Amino acid sequence: MIESTAPALSVRDLRKTYSVPERESGMRASIRSLWRRRTSEVVAVAGITFDVAPGEVVGFLGPNGAGKTTTLKMLAGLLHPTAGEARVLGFEPWQREHDYLRQMTLVMGQRNQLVWDIPVADSYELNRAIYAIPIDDYRGALAELDELLELGPLLPKPVRNLSLGERMKCELAGALLHRPRMLFLDEPTLGLDVTAQRRIRAFVAAYAERHQATVLLTSHYMADVEALAERVIVIHRGGLLFDGALGTLVERFSPFKTVTVDLDYPVEGLERFGEIVSIEELRITLRAPKSEAAALTARLLAELPVIDLSVSDPPIDEVIDRVFSAPADEAEPARLVGTSA
């Protein structure tokens, strides 16, 4: 249980609206737009409020265009909000005070921060100079990151010669050399293979635990969220849809249980037991309403040659898909915001 008198991150009614130019195609419309410029307002973030405690790792979820990256950029100080307030580690982020920048980092998957044509070690030296890291602190941080990520063989190589997984490891390490207390991670495992994803997850978890760092993580890979975050914040159409425990999200948006049965031999007429999700040789997967799962299990055990049987909640990514595809009247943010726990 994390105890603190003040949140590491506090957001109140944060909003961001863009004014986007509009014009019809064609030469005449182009000339007319020189004198009469038409614009439309696009709401990227529609007023969100939440707190994150020191040392907490929170999944920040939403479909493409929900406003996740825009929110992270505001909290990192790259964008000014249209309205609302935010305090990160006691600072107003868009003031970009030196003391704040030394305590936070923003990592965006597949967007290079290291210098492309020089060795990784030289990029790290450049970061040391930018952050004015004392040489002993720098060596200690690099040794720690090397221990967690096995960077040694990569340090002499130019960044352009690294694989995507190797580059992402080096990008993360470079972003953490100054040992920030606040991490904004935007799709840190995007495009990586399964092995590289696991390494990055293990590294983030180890770093957060070792330094009591606060992490706000966006990812389309639900395995990232399941591995790192007990709490999730879900935004949809720019507004806050859910804020609470990951298990509560599953409970609220998944009225079904998944029942998996291993049979001793093939059986006909399995449709009588309900909705069949898949059949793989002698393994049958069914979906049943939660209220009927116990009765279905009893029927399966009584009527089929069952070798093994398991009942589980559906995968997290299936639950998230259900959240985002919910009808507008079901997805009213004020009705679905949970209580963080």
Image (tube, rainbow, N blue to C red):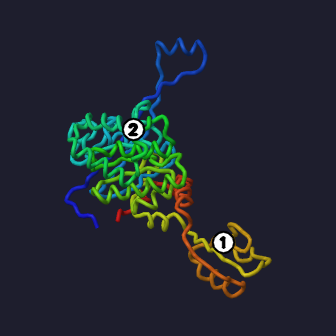
Residue at left 29%, top 54%?
Answer: 213
Q: Is residue 228 above or below residue 235?
A: below
In front here: 167 or 280?
167
Looking at the picture, how far across and down is residue 148, in whole percent?
37, 54
Residue at left 40%, top 40%?
Answer: 70
Q: CA distance from mark 2 to mark 1?
A: 50 Å
For mark 1, what is the residue? 286
Instruction: Find residue 120 and name its label.
Output: 2
Residue 119: name its quadrant: top left
Q: Amino acid at mark 2?
A: Val
Drawn side of residue 176 relative to residue 224, left or right? left
Q: Quadrant of the N terminus?
A: bottom left
Q: Quadrant of the C terminus?
A: bottom left
Residue at left 45%, top 37%?
Answer: 111
Of pointers 2 and 1, the one earlier in the residue sequence: 2
Nearer the observer: mark 2 or 1; the answer is: 2
Residue 100: name its quadrant: top left
Instruction: Find residue 41 and name its label.
Output: none
The residue at the far right in this view is 268
Q: Is residue 60 above or below residue 280?
A: above
Q: Is residue 306 above or below residue 43?
A: below
Q: Quick one: label 2, few (<14), some, or many (20+) residues within 10 Å?
A: many
Q: Amino acid at mark 1?
A: Leu
Residue at left 41%, top 43%?
Answer: 170
The residue at the far bottom in this view is 302
Judged from the image, the secondary structure of the residue bearing numbered disc 2 is helix
Looking at the picture, how far across and down is residue 226, in whole percent?
46, 61
